[in-house]
Image (spheres, coloured by chain):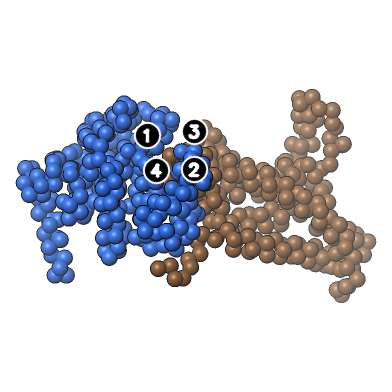
Chain colours: A brown, B blue
Amino acid sequence: MEFDVQSLKDCFFSGIQYLGVTVKISLVSIIFGTILALIVALVRFYKVPVLSQLFALFVTVYRGIPIMLIILIGHLMYVMHFDTVVKALHLSVKIKDVDIVLLGYIVMTVGVIPSISETFRGALKSIDKTQYEACYSIGLTTTQSLRRVILPQMFPVAFPSYINNILGVIKGVPLLSSVGIMEVMQGSLLPCSVSYSYLEGYAAAALIYFMLITLILNVAKYIEKNLNRYRVIRKNTK
Amino acid sequence: MLELDHVKKNFGKLSVLKDVSLKIENGDVVVLLGPSGSGKTTLLRCVNFLEKADNGKMIIDGDNIDLHTANKKTIRKVRKKVAFVFQNYGLFQNKTALQNITEGLIVARKIPKAEAIKKGEEVLKWVGLSDKKDYYPSQLSGGQQQRIGIARAVALDPEIILFDEPTSALDPELVGDVLSLIKRVAQRGISMMVVTHEMSFAQEVANKVVFMDGGVIVEQGSPRDIFYYPKEERTKKFLERVQHNERNMYYI
């Protein structure tokens, strides 16, 4: 079997048309997932009764199941119950009118919550107890101290693992092809059904992914440098 | 004026404070002495609600407050009158020296920003760190950080400042600076409660010394009474041991 550069090119351009879908699913799930994960982390960190136990159970169960299974189970539930839920909400949409990408948004959003919330919770725990107490001692409320002192210190600590979580989401998107969502990987393989150039197809998908993630890592590196401003120790302090 | 009434605190089965009552007049400098585990720090933390007492009352500024059942609003009200200086400084790591001081003024006291900054710069000058106002805590030495910690407390114009072993995390050569600053705070007429192991500081600055052991106040009185004419056996033993150590230091 020979590696055909022309096929690679075809597959690459076919795949890159679906980059938008992958990016869209990733962005939506990262944005909503981060917000929800922060809430879960804070609830568990402050041990809010009932809710914190509930979230702990959710995180434990969810982390114990492969993401592929969650997608498949999610898909089944989506197919079976979409119409009932829509009816209950008094909306007049039918499942065939809705893009299956919606399922991708939901599954991936819920899917990132456990990992990101654990990242945040760990970072919250790493902050010295005195920082919290100092906030209280000068008369700040819990919300004020979170917003002005604790979270600004938490994000830099969480950042490297958070980026790892984000990469996990982006690299998890191809799994959605199992429920018929067209994204970068499936897009790259489209020409292969004619030419049987699967090696080139996979290589093209890998190339697109590699470029996307290199870009993200570079942006992350830049952000990280700025986040750690206050931790830099200048010389000649005395 | 601050009055503590029958304060009790347990950590699990360990009873750290067993019925402590204490009265502090305006302008008093009260030094709490005692072996470790005697409950000095816990008492201090209970006053500022960093620790919730199991029982006890506090009268501050004419307000009668239950230390166990006080709600959030009352707690915040008390905290506006009581400032705290931490053993390990407790400066906000993500804020500059000046921001550390203005934070409480702007956010908790709702003082206009320009006014708060003016006040912050004034206090920074008073502690002799004007040139460090834009430095982050990680760029300052321990002694400088603690002086900012004290500046933060003073800027809030509290009725009383609580010092929790303010010099015990410092290099020996920096202790003097911080102690002389605390002395200047006392000269401003702000009441203070100081937990410390610096005996000479206690003798020089305090006008009331409280000796605690095993969660109770064993003895209290003027520095002269406690250091030269202690009545209780436990106080005598403690002072003997501490002073013995201080004398021996020169031979190490």
Measured along the vertical axis of the image, is residue B174 above or below residue A64? below
The label on residue A49 is 3
| Mark 1 Cα shell of 10 Å, populated few (<14), some (14-19), many (≥20) | many
The label on residue B78 is 1
Residue in the image at 60% along x and 44% along y: A37
Q: Amino acid at mark 1?
A: Val
Question: Given the image, what chain letter belongs to the residue carrying mark 1?
Answer: B
Q: Amino acid at mark 2?
A: Ile
| Mark 3 Cα shell of 10 Å, populated few (<14), some (14-19), many (≥20) | few
Residue in the image at 63% along x and 42% along y: A36
Q: Amino acid at mark 4?
A: Leu
Measured along the vertical axis of the image, is residue B103 above or below residue A204? above
Q: Are marks 3 and 2 on the same chain?
A: no
Residue in the image at 73% along x and 46% along y: A28
| Mark 4 Cα shell of 10 Å, populated few (<14), some (14-19), many (≥20) | many
Q: Are marks 1 and 3 on the same chain?
A: no
Residue B160 on image: x %, y %: 31, 40
Residue A39 on image: x %, y %: 58, 41
